[in-house]
Image: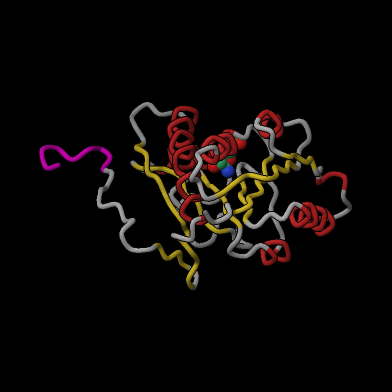
Amino acid sequence: MSAKTRVGVLVSGRGSNLQALIDAAKAPHYPAEIVLVISNVPGVQGLARAEAAGIATRAIDHKGFPNREEFETALHETLTAAHVELLCNAGFMRLLTEGFVNRWLNRHLNIHPSLLPAFKGLNTHARVLESGARLSGCTVHFVRAAMDDGPIVAQAAVPVVAGDTEDTLAARVLAAEHRLYPHALHLVASGEAQVEGELVAEKPGSESRSALFSPPLKGTV
Ligand code: GRF
């Protein structure tokens, strides 16, 4: 059996996506293992989740550094000391400089709660509701220096339904995130999905032929 990809996860808070990755990685044939979880905010639930799973943790508080570069140097050195091969942002709320992004180029994933390239940035769900969009969802993509930008690995769509509030839509999207991120990490860690140019190429045979319609089509599907 080939060795599992050593994954580091960056969090800033609740860590429910981290939990989904931890749970998925327990499967014997999952191609990645989480070896380190780093938070830029001390004391968050994400760190407690990792500790409960017996995973090494570090709090590297960005406030303790004079500038972004020195914070990122500490981050990078901690990741390389743990022999991390692939990095996953999971609710990590710091923008990273081009220098750090380039050091982890094509070895660094992020999850964003919209169907990118629509609705980049913060307050996603409120803006989706204001726009009148009928579908929202989530995206796992490789990280680039521009926020919520980079080659898309996988997406899941969810309907926006009548009466939705930010909270109800966020909960529906989050449930999809918890299924999507383990799937996307599997694709990348196994080598089934990789960056070619500025797109992600998937090995043939893994395409899904179904589509999600919202509102549903009547009588035709
Ligand atoms: C998720 O919605 C993720 O897409 C966004 O921040 C949220 C983090 O939630 N980037 P959690 O910390 O994984 O529970």
Q: Going 33% across and 63% down the picture, which residue do you hit?
A: 204
Q: Going 37% across and 26% down the picture, which residue do you hit?
A: 163
Q: Position of residue 80 (x, y in %)?
A: 75, 57
- Residue furthest left in the image: 219
Left or right of 175 in this view: 216: left
- Residue furthest bottom in the image: 197
Q: Position of residue 154 (x, y in %)?
A: 43, 52
In which quarter of the view is residue 132 placed?
top left
Q: Position of residue 119 (x, y in %)?
A: 49, 49
In this view of the protein, can residue 164 be seen by the observer? yes
Q: Going 75% across and 51% down the picture, which residue do you hit?
A: 82
The vertical placement of 136 against 143, above or below, is above
| Nearer to me, 34 or 111 | 34
Magenta stretch, residue numbers? 213-221
The vertical placement of 106 against 45, above or below, is below
Left or right of 113 in this view: 60: right
Is 218 part of what is drawn in magenta? yes
Is 196 part of what is drawn in magenta? no
Q: How many marks?
A: 0
In this view of the protein, can residue 123 be seen by the observer? no
Quarter of the image where ligand 1 sits: top right
Q: Position of residue 221 (x, y in %)?
A: 15, 42
Left or right of 26 in this view: 206: left
- What colouring method underlies this structural image? secondary structure
Secondary structure character of the magenta stretch overall: loop
